[in-house]
């Protein structure tokens, strides 16, 4: 059975090839675009398919449950982008390709004006934001293809750097009802990449519900309320959402019997701050629909904030998914998934082999190692440390080979024919379909990266 989370009431206002490198320590992705650290982000509200995986509201999601911000592929969608049938997983998370009417948790949503909010874990110069929705006659039991989607909302950023949280007002088409998939696409300006977020929704029309002019049916009570990330002054509440015959407008959060805030019905979590250390608090919440009907209170939970006087002897978890994002002749840009700690992660130590080469703030999940030798092989790992000095186990170890310092020279008057599976360097000249092209970016060719199709790599002479 599908579960449903409710909200009420979203306005209109290129891709660098990815080479998959397999190492003994695992699989990581290398974008062949020197000295650029890519952006990352996901649809936080309404919660995307990938984000609901992280919240344990979607199951059997694979690696994306740890990194919903990483559904990244070539951009310029729908001309470019992931292959048909792989769009919802960005071509890299196969678990997200699965499409049936009952597979994914759905968000109850009304047609008309809706707000879509992205959380960016690494901001980057942005070309535009696009929102697609499945057509009226789409098949919910087949993997989604381009022919199933139509554009209904766009915002252009013109290359500017966005904030960490970005919201858009969009108009959901009034002729859609029932189960549909909304696809949010964040097009990056200077890498040619894009991020893809699928959103599963159950659409109703405003005012629909019980067949009368008055909605008198209250939402169900939120369930499975839990607290996590507990510190001396803050904590995070998470819950399984309510359902409603129309849609849930909001949630009211109660602390010690008093309402402390009202948040949108799209939410499945809330960060509580301003607490006192070593203090016990009682939390509950209720759902409210657009007609003002209130659900019963959820079950209460009792939470005690940590005390600064209690020694912290728990080490953070090991950083995960360490990978090299970009490689040049003299540097490697590392990225990883963050550690967790019973209090907070204070810093990350970067190791090159057995030597610590840098320490970065605990909020960071990327670092560029410089001063390396060209055409040389290095190993890297990361450890997390909390403010008490507890050190985590090491992350996965990766092996990276830097690029050559200078490309081989090809005689200008003798361009060779372009070929697949061939390494090319900046300045290389090739002949393709009777046109001479000059290589703009070092890469190894594959059959889809022909000079006439991928101008980010080749420039006509």
Image (cartoon, rainbow, N blue to C red):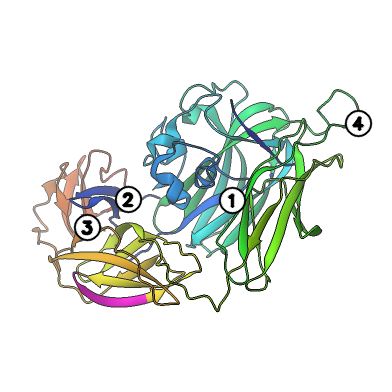
Real-space Cα separation, disc 2 to disc 4, in angstroms: 58 Å
Q: Residue at x 41, y 31 (%)?
A: 84
Q: Which residue is mark 2?
A: 455
Q: Which residue is mark 3?
A: 442
Horizontal and vertical percent for residue 154? Answer: 60, 47
Magenta stretch prevailing secondary structure: strand
Instruction: Mark 2 vs mark 4: give the one in front.
Output: 4
Label 4 environment density (alpha carbons within 10 Å; few <14, some 14–19, many ≥20):
few
Q: Horizontally, is 8 left or right of 389 in the view?
A: right
Mark positioned earlier in the residue sequence (1 or 2): 1
Residue with the most extreme front position: 310
Q: Is residue 245 visible?
A: yes
Real-space Cα separation, disc 2 to disc 3, in angstroms: 13 Å
**Considering the numbered disc 4 on the image, is that residue within a helix, a strand or a loop?**
loop
- For residue 137, above or below residue 398: above
**Occupied quadrant, residue 366:** bottom left
Q: Which residue is mark 1?
A: 44
Real-space Cα separation, disc 4 to disc 1, in angstroms: 31 Å
Q: Horizontally, is 358 left or right of 147 in the view?
A: left
Which segment did they paint magenta?
A: 353-359
- Residue 330 numbered tag: none
The answer to whether the residues at label 1 and label 2 have Cβ atoms under 8 Å apart is no
242 and 441: which is toward the camera: 242
Horizontal and vertical percent for residue 309? Answer: 55, 79
Q: Which residue is mark 4?
A: 214
Horizontal and vertical percent for residue 427? Answer: 19, 60
Instruction: Mark 2 vs mark 3: give the one in front.
Output: 3
Mark positioned earlier in the residue sequence (2 or 3): 3
Q: Is residue 34 magenta?
A: no
Real-space Cα separation, disc 1 to disc 3, in angstroms: 36 Å
Horizontal and vertical percent for residue 8? Answer: 75, 41
Instruction: Mark 4 vs mark 3: give the one in front.
Output: 4
């Amino acid at each position: 059975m599908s579960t449903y989370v409710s909200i009420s009431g979203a306005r209109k206002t290129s891709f660098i090839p990815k080479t998959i490198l397999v190492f003994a320590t695992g699989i990581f992705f290398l974008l062949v675009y020197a000295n650029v650290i890519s952006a990352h982000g996901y649809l936080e509200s309404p919660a995307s398919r990938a984000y609901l995986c992280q919240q344990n509201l979607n199951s059997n999601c694979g690696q994306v449950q740890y990194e919903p911000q990483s559904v990244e592929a070539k951009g310029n969608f729908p001309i470019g982008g992931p292959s048909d049938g792989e769009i919802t997983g960005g071509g890299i998370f196969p678990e997200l390709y699965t499409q049936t009417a009952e597979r994914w948790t759905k968000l109850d949503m009304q047609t008309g004006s809706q707000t879509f909010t992205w959380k960016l874990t690494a901001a980057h110069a942005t070309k535009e934001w696009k929102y697609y929705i499945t057509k009226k006659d789409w098949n919910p039991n087949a993997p989604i293809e381009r022919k199933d989607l139509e554009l209904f909302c766009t915002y252009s950023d013109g290359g500017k750097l966005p904030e960490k949280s970005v919201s858009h007002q969009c108009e959901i088409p009034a002729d859609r009802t029932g189960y549909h998939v909304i696809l949010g696409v964040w097009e990056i300006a200077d890498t040619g990449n894009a991020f893809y977020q699928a959103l599963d929704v159950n659409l109703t029309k405003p005012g629909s519900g019980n067949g009368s002019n008055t909605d008198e049916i209250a939402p169900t009570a939120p369930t499975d309320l839990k607290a996590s990330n507990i510190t001396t002054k803050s904590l995070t509440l998470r819950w399984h959402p309510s359902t409603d015959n129309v849609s849930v407008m909001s949630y009211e959060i109660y602390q010690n019997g008093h309402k402390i805030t009202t948040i949108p019905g799209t939410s499945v979590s809330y960060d509580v701050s301003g607490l006192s250390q070593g203090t016990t608090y009682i939390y509950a919440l209720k759902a409210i629909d657009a007609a003002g009907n209130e659900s019963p209170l959820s079950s209460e939970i009792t939470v005690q904030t940590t005390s600064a006087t209690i020694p912290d002897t728990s080490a953070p978890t090991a950083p995960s998914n360490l990978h090299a994002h970009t490689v040049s002749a003299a540097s490697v840009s590392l990225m990883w998934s963050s550690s967790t700690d019973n209090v907070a992660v204070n810093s990350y130590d970067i190791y090159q082999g057995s030597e610590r080469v840098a320490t970065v703030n605990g909020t960071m999940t990327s670092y560029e190692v410089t001063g390396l030798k060209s055409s040389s092989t290095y190993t890297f790992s990361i450890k997390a440390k909390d403010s008490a000095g507890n050190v985590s186990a090491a992350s996965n170890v990766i092996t990276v080979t830097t690029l050559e310092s200078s490309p081989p020279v090809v005689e200008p008057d003798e361009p060779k024919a372009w070929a697949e599976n061939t390494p090319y360097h900046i300045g290389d000249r090739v002949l393709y379909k009777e046109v001479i092209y000059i290589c703009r970016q070092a890469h190894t060719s594959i059959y889809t990266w022909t000079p006439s199709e991928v101008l980010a790599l080749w420039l006509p002479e």
